[in-house]
């Protein structure tokens, strides 16, 4: 009881200090990435506008503000904050990482590459190697991507994202057993990682049409969709499985989401077209023909996946 009272008194004292020194509280909140993005951004702005920061401390506050705005989806302000941080301290790891992540997400791999190279050279840790892996994967250099994801795992042996990334690269190189092992490892660490769940689902349906495997793949697809409802690979794998089971309404729902995420994607369009047509909606043929305009071999791909398109 005495310990509890002392802890309570200590907490109250800290709270009192926070009330007496708003700037100290802003400093704590600005550095706290677990706060809601708006709260963190507001704290960083108060800190930056106070005029009490200079040099690396100001750069760190700007980098933290950039992270908060990036989490809130305000990419423009995030990039401005990262640029301002780097103008003060061109070796600020937080700003380098934040800017590189935005560039990678937007497909600007060439612009991101030198930033990531600097991060790796400066000891940016597992995250730097993960980003190097994504750049190599985006360029189609699967062996380099495997090396980068493996480097990330050397630094963080239980990094589920690195296992999933390496699995995708192994699959691309035809190492299905290695890919399965890495997907299994990723899911063992993080059972809700949609990238790994959807990846294992696709690996399964491309290797076998055995109903037993379909059941396992369906579990992965449904778990991936539950974790990330707008994950393209999760919804398309679920859609293919529903088509193989002649579940036309369920397949259409999955491909509807996939088309919304990637309008014009031939896999999503053709899948939705098949679901509509087999479900009695003749207009599904429009989707199928549009998909063929983008990819003349899309019908063959569905045949290879065990889907009866007519």
Image: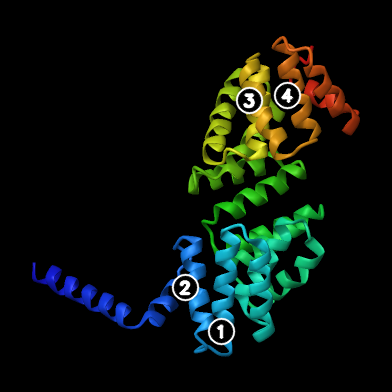
x and y percent of residue 244 in the render? 67, 18
x and y percent of residue 198 in the render? 62, 38
Viewer can see residue 241: no
What secondary structure is found at the residue carrying circle 2? helix
What secondary structure is found at the residue carrying circle 4? helix
Mark 1 or 2, which is nearer the eye? 2
The answer to which image quadrant residue 204 occupies is top right
As drawn, 226 above or below 147: above
Lower sequence index among marks 3 and 1: 1
The Cα atoms of the two marked residues, 1 and 2, are separated by 13 Å
Lower sequence index among marks 3 and 2: 2
Mark 3 or 2, which is nearer the eye? 2
**Residue at the spot of label 4:** 272
As drawn, 242 above or below 183: above
Contact between marks 4 and 1 (CB within 8 A): the answer is no
Label 4: few (<14), some (14–19) or many (≥20) C-alpha neighbours in 10 Å: many
Label 3: few (<14), some (14–19) or many (≥20) C-alpha neighbours in 10 Å: some
Q: Which mark is residue 58?
A: 1
**Residue at the spot of label 3:** 253
The Cα atoms of the two marked residues, 4 and 1, are separated by 51 Å
The Cα atoms of the two marked residues, 4 and 2, are separated by 46 Å
Lower sequence index among marks 4 and 2: 2
């Amino acid at each position: 009881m005495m310990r509890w009272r002392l802890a309570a008194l200590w907490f109250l004292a800290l709270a009192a200090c926070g009330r007496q020194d708003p700037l100290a509280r802003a400093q704590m909140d600005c550095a706290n990435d677990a706060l809601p993005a708006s709260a963190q951004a507001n704290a960083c702005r108060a800190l930056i506008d106070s005029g009490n920061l200079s040099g690396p401390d100001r750069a760190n506050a700007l980098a933290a503000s950039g992270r908060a705005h990036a989490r809130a989806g305000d990419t423009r302000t995030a990039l401005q904050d990262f640029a301002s941080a780097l103008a003060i301290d061109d070796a600020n790891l937080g700003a380098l990482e934040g800017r590189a992540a935005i560039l990678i997400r937007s497909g600007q791999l060439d612009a991101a590459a030198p930033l990531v190279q600097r991060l790796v050279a400066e000891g940016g840790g597992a995250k730097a190697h993960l980003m190097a892996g994504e750049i190599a994967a985006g360029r189609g250099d699967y062996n380099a991507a495997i090396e980068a994801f493996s480097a990330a795992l050397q630094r963080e042996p239980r990094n589920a994202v690195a296992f999933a990334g390496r699995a995708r690269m192994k699959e691309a190189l035809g190492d299905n057993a290695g890919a399965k092992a890495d997907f299994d490892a990723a899911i063992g660490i993080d059972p809700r990682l949609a990238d790994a769940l959807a990846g294992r689902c696709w690996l399964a349906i491309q290797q076998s049409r055995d109903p037993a495997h379909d059941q396992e793949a369906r579990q992965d697809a449904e778990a991936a969709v539950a974790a990330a409802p707008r994950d393209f690979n999760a919804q398309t794998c679920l859609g293919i499985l529903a088509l193989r089971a002649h579940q036309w309404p369920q397949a259409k729902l999955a491909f509807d989401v996939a088309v919304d995420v990637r309008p014009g994607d031939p896999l999503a369009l053709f899948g939705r077209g098949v679901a509509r047509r087999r479900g009695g909606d003749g207009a599904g043929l429009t989707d199928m023909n549009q998909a063929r305009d983008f990819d003349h071999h899309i019908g063959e791909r569905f045949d290879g996946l065990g889907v009866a398109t007519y």
